[in-house]
Image (tube, rainbow, N blue to C red):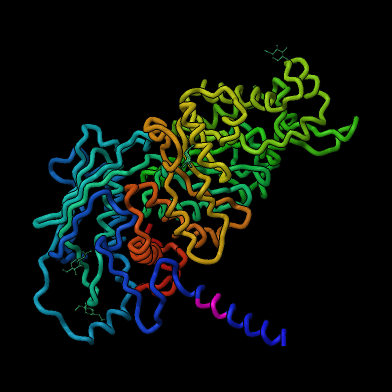
Amino acid sequence: MELRVSAVVTALLLRLTCTGAHQPPGEPAYDPGLPPDLHSPHGSLWPLPQTVVISSMVYRLSSVTFQIVHSAESTASVGCSILDNAFRRYYYYIFGSSTGSSQRQATLNSTGGRGPGPGELRQLQVTITSSDPECNQHPRITSSEAYEITVAQPAATLKSETVWGALRGLETFSQLVYEDEYITHLINKTEITDAPRFSHRGVLLDTSRHYLPIKVILKTLDAMSFNKFNVFHWHIVDDPSFPYQSVTFPKLSEQGAYHPVTHIYTLKDVQTVIEYARERGIRVIPEFDTPGHTQSWKGQSNLLTPCYNGEKPSGTFGPINPALNTTYDFMNQFFKEISWVFPDKYIHLGGDEVNFACWKSNPTITEFMKKQGFGSDYRKLESFYVKNVLDIVTSNLKGYIVWQEVFDNRVKIKSDTVVEVWMARNMKAELSKVTLAGFTTILAAPWYLDYISYGQDWQKYYQVEPLNFNGTVAQKKLVIGGEACLWGEFVDATNLASRLWPRASAVGERLWSSEETKDLNDAYKRLTKHRCRMVQRGIPAEPLFVGYCDYEYKDYKEFN
Ligand SMILES: *[C@@H]1O[C@H](CO)[C@@H](O)[C@H](O)[C@H]1NC(C)=O
Ligand SMILES: *[C@@H]1O[C@H](CO)[C@@H](O)[C@H](O)[C@H]1NC(C)=O
Ligand SMILES: *[C@@H]1O[C@H](CO)[C@@H](O)[C@H](O)[C@H]1NC(C)=O
Ligand SMILES: *[C@@H]1O[C@H](CO)[C@@H](O)[C@H](O)[C@H]1NC(C)=O
């Protein structure tokens, strides 16, 4: 009897669970008989621009006649390769895909012709207004990404101060173009004024836990540009492996990489990534995390602390040894190299999760602690080390970003240090504290995309409001952005793209669009189409929910 009841209850529960599972939160129940209504007044724009007015007047674009060109009044012209390449790239994003759709075309051709069509739009004219368009520069934290688009006859126009705004505007323009059922390319009459809400919009990739082939990194940079991200935080080395091939210290990767030849990033590889990123308006910030997370730095002798088992060395090694002068000689040379290899103003110095057990076991360290008057406070030892490294980096005219522990442990940091908040616990209190102390802040805590779960977790990332903490207006101004972090324990080339996209897209819109952009229903519609567009452009972004794309993923040929 009891058994029977419990079986019925179980069956009911199962049924409820299943029904619930097939219903997108915030959406009406899915009806398999009808395709979901994906019409948004904002089309398929992602991230949503600050102001958009789309009218119902429609123009036609022809792949034969349409051109993206420099306007006569632009301060940039043919020869500004960053724009020339972007013009070519976006022409392909707009028209390239239809060449692979002959089957759809054939089916549709037989469904009949069309009447007199809409007027044709023949040009997008791009105007750079600043006397220095920055064609040959690298994007910076202070670069303007603002732009304006007008789609109207006789030509569409895109205006920005420098090339960086133009790159963002080209992406937006390409998102305005759509195909009708006859595969005709259409665009509505539109006015857009746009600029990002936050200036630091990053994606972190981890190339230590798994090696990521250069091609995978470049594809990620493509996808980042589709989502208007502008920082590639390259967590390049960590405990498991050291794939960065140092010019000054080649032994580091010889002994620290998973494979000294096939699983490394040469200087040329790194420069390829930096240039590819630059062409898409993306800064590359490398992270060399110390003194913890350094097991793979074993190629440099006497750098890591030998751990002791009682009186004797145990044969294992701990964090970097802060008690030796040779450590700082090494760091000086190493960061001199990093400072010229990576042109960005900032280097990420890590500083998280330092385990003190090995330091505690080592007699040389104990002696050093005594001499320095640190007592038994190993945080003081850590601070001593970090302070020295920060000074080394400063002497190379670089700024630095550190994980929040460096601030929490009261290391003396320069007033222009950027503190990255990553711990989800007490995140709001931490934001209050860091900004109250006057430090510029980046938020990563709510966006650890390596944590996966069933369902539409993009909504959770989307609903985060970065400035929802107690603080003054001045404090809130110090939050310059955030990062979507894809740590590499369970990620390599096989699943990186589908795990990152479109989940990171939610973070992309949160960091670009206005605070008022938070309608989940509208976001669902736009993101569903944006995800199909990424698929069409060769990124195997995973689906949000039940549905289909006009162009399903099938190893599309690359656009570059
Ligand atoms: C574009 O114009 C068409 C035709 O008037 C209209 O149906 C459609 O809703 C418009 N698109 C947007 C995003 O407003
Ligand atoms: C469909 O029609 C277009 C335009 O008339 C034509 O260019 C194309 O070759 C046709 N495609 C097929 C597969 O018949
Ligand atoms: C390390 O450098 C400091 C400061 O220059 C100096 O006082 C100290 O004697 C040096 N220690 C060793 C072991 O050379
Ligand atoms: C801000 O502080 C007030 C009062 O101390 C508290 O009630 C509130 O929850 C805090 N808000 C946030 C977002 O932390």
Q: Nearer the viewer, residue 373 or 551?
A: 373
Quadrant of image for the C terminus: bottom left
Instruction: Give the left or right position of residue 319, taking residue 450 as reference.
Output: right
- Name the quadrant where ligand 2 sits: bottom left
* Residue shown at 59% from the left, 41% from the top: 244
Residue 72 image-quadrant placement: top left
Nearest the eye: 443 or 240? 443
Q: Is residue 18 magenta?
A: yes
Q: Position of residue 285 (x, y in %)?
A: 48, 38
User: Residue visible at 11% across and 73% down?
Assistant: 117
Give the x, y percent position of residue 139. 37, 38
The answer to whether any part of residue 69 appears in the image is no
Tell me which residue sits at (65%, 41%) in the image. 253
Q: Is 402 a magenta residue?
A: no
> From the viewer's perspective, is residue 486 above or below residue 313?
below
Q: How many marks?
A: 0
Q: Nearer the viewer, residue 345 or 278?
A: 345
Q: Which residues are magenta?
A: 15-19
| Residue 439 placement, left or right of 136 | right
Residue 462 falls in image quadrant: bottom left
Q: Is residue 366 above or below residue 148?
A: above
From this view, report whether residue 427 is shown above or below residue 398: below
User: Quick one: quadrant of the N terminus?
Assistant: bottom right
Q: Where is residue 364 shown, x and y percent of the image?
A: 80, 23
